[in-house]
Amino acid sequence: MSEHLLSATQMAQFVASGYLKFEDMVPRDLCEACLDEMQNNRGYLAVGTPFETTWPKGTALGEAFRLPQVQGLIQSLVGPDPLYDHHAAHLVKGGVMKGPDMHQDSVIDFRENYYDIQLSLFPADTPDEMGGTFLIPGTQFRNVRTSEITMYQHMRGKIWANCTAGTMYVWNTRVWHGARSNHTEKDRYMYKLRLNPTQPQTRLFDMTDLDNADVAKALSHNHGWEGNEHRYELMRRVQLWRFVSDQPDYDIGERFLRRREYNPAAA
Amino acid sequence: MPDVQDVLVLFQTTPGLDAAVVAWSRYEASKGPGIKDLVEEEEPPYRNAIAAMRDGWQVIQMSEMKHRPPGDDAYEDGPLPYQTVLSRFNPMVTDDSEE
């Protein structure tokens, strides 16, 4: 399993951008079997129960989310024994157009040192014109009420799934996102699975490259929308990085968090 | 038929009319009651509100400065902090499918 854990640099990218993309995560033949199962995959299983016991076995989707590389990803982000939260087979039928759709899932979530993950599997080739899910990387620290951000029709930094079958995105559930128009005649599926941690999300990834300069570079990334907010976003990222990497004094650049923490009068 | 009002909203991270645009939205009543198919736009229509004003858009709302509460609440992040709302009147585009 350890060979499939995220590196520290990848983990820093996840902390900063709120998502990671993995091509060829699920073999194409298994993807086709998953796609067949998705046609009749409705409803939730038991929310908040252990994933391993709840998630079906002996099915293509059961197998896909138990592949060693997927398990390594899950373990790196929410630990080896996550809880099942919910799943959904998202369908945008061929020819269905989408207007503004930006939203943040679920409810306002102020839990500090915590995040849920969503795994998004694209079981078929999803070219640009098919309208793969879009994300605004880096927005996971900005709490809003679900669909009020539909008012943001366009935003700098927007990316969307434009990928081959078997590609999987993993993302912090707070990232702003939405669906796009499907300009083809073919139905588009994206299979979503949300998981919760059962332990503090600390030191779960491969720490070997913890001191790599790429870590700070990834944490500092500017996605294009941050503008004057960038240093405040950076402070949020560093706070989460301190937690996941178990480095309570970590800071970067001008050490902005020190400006909140250093105060001889408070000692 | 008289011209109808189109609205352009420019979202910024500082409040001035010369602030860079980081997000943008169009409410173009002249073209229909809503956007049925959102076409991707990599760049905003104007670099800032002043550039839009020079193209005939009138500012109908600009942002006020924000007061920050003391303590950690000052760091709470939410929606993008500032916006400029602009208006321009344009001829109605007839679209039978919207009726």
Image (cartoon, rainbow, N blue to C red):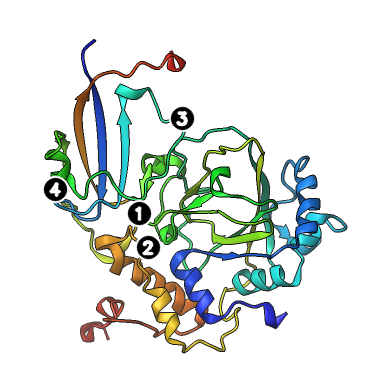
Residue for badge 2: A223
Q: Is residue A45 left or right of residue A134?
A: right
Relative depth, front residue between A75 and B35: B35
Q: Is residue A94 above or below residue B72?
A: above
The amino acid type found where label 1 is placed reads: Arg
Whichever of labels 3 and 4 marks the residue nearer the N terminus, that label is 4
Dot 2 or dot 1: first in sequence order is: 1
Instruction: Tell me which residue sits at (19%, 48%) in the image.
Output: B48
Q: CA distance from mark 4 to mark 1?
A: 18 Å
- Dot 2: within a 10 Å radius of its alpha carbon, few (fewer than 14), some, or many (20 or more) residues? some
Q: CA distance from mark 2 to mark 1?
A: 7 Å
Q: Are marks 2 and 1 in contact (CB under 8 Å)?
A: yes
Write down the quadrant of residue A158 in the picture: bottom left
Which label was assigned to residue B17?
4
> Which residue is tagged 1?
A156
User: Which residue type carries mark 4?
Assistant: Leu
Give the Cα separation between the discs numbered 3 and 2: 27 Å
| Amino acid marked by disc 2 | His
Q: Nearer the viewer, mark 4 or mark 1?
A: 1
**Do the residues under discs 3 and 2 have CB atoms within 8 angstroms?**
no
Residue indicated by mark 3: B36
Q: Badge 1 local density, few (<14 within 10 Å), some, or many (20+)?
A: some
Q: Position of residue A3 (x, y in %)?
A: 69, 82
For the question of whether residue A54 can be seen, the reply is: no
**As drawn, A162 above or below A222:** above
Residue A163's x, y, as percent? Answer: 60, 56
